Structures are given as structure tokens and as C-alpha cells.
Image (cartoon, rainbow, N blue to C red):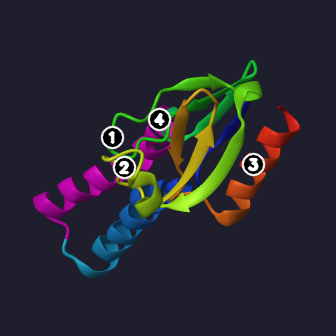
């Protein structure tokens, strides 16, 4: 099994669950008086830091592309119903990276700015939102698909 998790997702989770709470804690410790409110806020921030890794690993499957047993599975949720689908890699005829305007010709409800259109033949076209992936990650995904066709 091979899993591709968007780098921007990983960085966002790190900022949300580690950097922001640590900055808040350090500000409270050095600048604020300790009273009931600030102690409550400290407990909340420490809870975020502790729960962060759990939330990351629980949601990692919901923000990744998985290659398993000759299939590509899309778990990238772009706010539409276009996630959770699985198709065989060997059926892929063409892959194209394009912007939202071209995809909206086929999928009216596409909300992603950058997508990977995948043609599986027989008018079976799917897309994966790649807005959170870096260009290097997108190239790795395409290489992986081509190597396993």
C-alpha cells in the first residue's frame, strides 16, 4: 500500500495543533496573570497539543490518495461528493492536471482550484483535488501511477 498525504495538510495540522497552542501558552505564562480564566485556557491549549497527533492520524485517511491492490482510492474531500471512490490503476487511459474552469465543464459542482483529471475509459472520468499537494508530490503521484499501470 502506498499513501500520499498532502504536505499542506500536514503543515496545517502542525500549525493548528502545535504552533498556535504553544504560542498561546507561552504568551499566557510570560505576560498574563494566572487566574481561573487563564488556567482554563492553558488546559484547553494543552489539550489541543495532546489531541493534535490523534486528530492528525485519525483524519489522515480522510485526506490522502491511497494505492492498494492495484486500485487508486481518493480520500481527498473537496466539499463535494467526489471522494471515497476506488478504480483500478490499469484502466487509466489519461491523466491531466488542470484548473477549476476546465473541470467545471464536466463536473459542475467542483470547488477545487487545481485538480487531477483521470480518464478510466468508457466515459468514466474522475477527478482528485490536488490543491493541497505540492508540485513535487503531484509529480510523484503521476510517476507512481505510470509505473504501476
Where is the N terminus found, in terms of image quarters?
top right
Secondary structure of residue under mark 2:
loop
Q: Residue at x 46, y 59 (%)?
A: 102
Where is the C terminus found, in terms of image quarters?
top right
| Residue 129 picture location, percent across and down | 50, 50
Circle 2 residues within 10 Å: few <14, some 14–19, many ≥20: many
Q: Is residue 144 visible?
A: yes
Real-space CA distance between mark 4 and mark 2, rounded to the nearest whole angstrom = 18 Å
Circle 3 residues within 10 Å: few <14, some 14–19, many ≥20: some
Q: How many marks?
A: 4
Asked whether 128 falls inside the magenta stretch, the response is no
Q: Is residue 1 visible?
A: no
Q: Which mark is residue 33?
A: none
Residue identified by numbered label 3: 142
Report the magenta stretch's main SS: helix
Q: Residue at x 46, y 36 (%)?
A: 59
Secondary structure of residue under mark 3:
helix
Secondary structure of residue under mark 1:
loop
Q: Nearer the viewer, residue 98 or 20?
A: 98
| Residue 68 picture location, percent across and down | 71, 23
Amino acid at each position: 500500500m502506498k499513501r500520499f498525504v498532502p504536505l499542506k495538510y500536514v503543515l496545517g495540522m502542525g500549525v493548528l495543533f502545535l504552533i498556535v497552542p504553544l504560542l498561546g501558552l507561552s504568551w499566557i505564562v510570560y505576560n498574563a496573570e494566572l487566574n481561573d480564566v487563564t488556567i482554563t485556557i492553558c488546559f484547553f491549549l494543552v489539550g489541543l497539543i495532546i489531541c493534535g497527533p490523534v486528530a492528525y492520524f485519525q483524519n489522515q485517511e480522510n485526506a490522502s490518495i491511497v494505492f492498494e491492490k492495484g486500485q487508486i482510492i481518493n480520500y481527498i474531500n473537496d466539499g463535494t461528493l467526489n471522494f471515497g471512490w476506488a478504480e483500478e490503476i490499469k484502466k487509466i487511459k489519461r491523466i491531466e492536471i488542470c484548473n477549476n474552469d476546465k473541470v467545471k465543464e464536466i463536473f459542475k459542482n467542483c470547488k477545487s482550484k487545481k485538480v487531477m483529471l483521470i480518464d478510466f475509459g468508457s466515459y468514466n472520468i474522475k477527478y482528485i483535488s490536488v490543491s493541497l499537494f505540492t508540485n513535487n508530490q503531484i509529480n510523484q503521484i503521476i510517476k507512481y501511477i505510470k509505473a504501476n499501470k
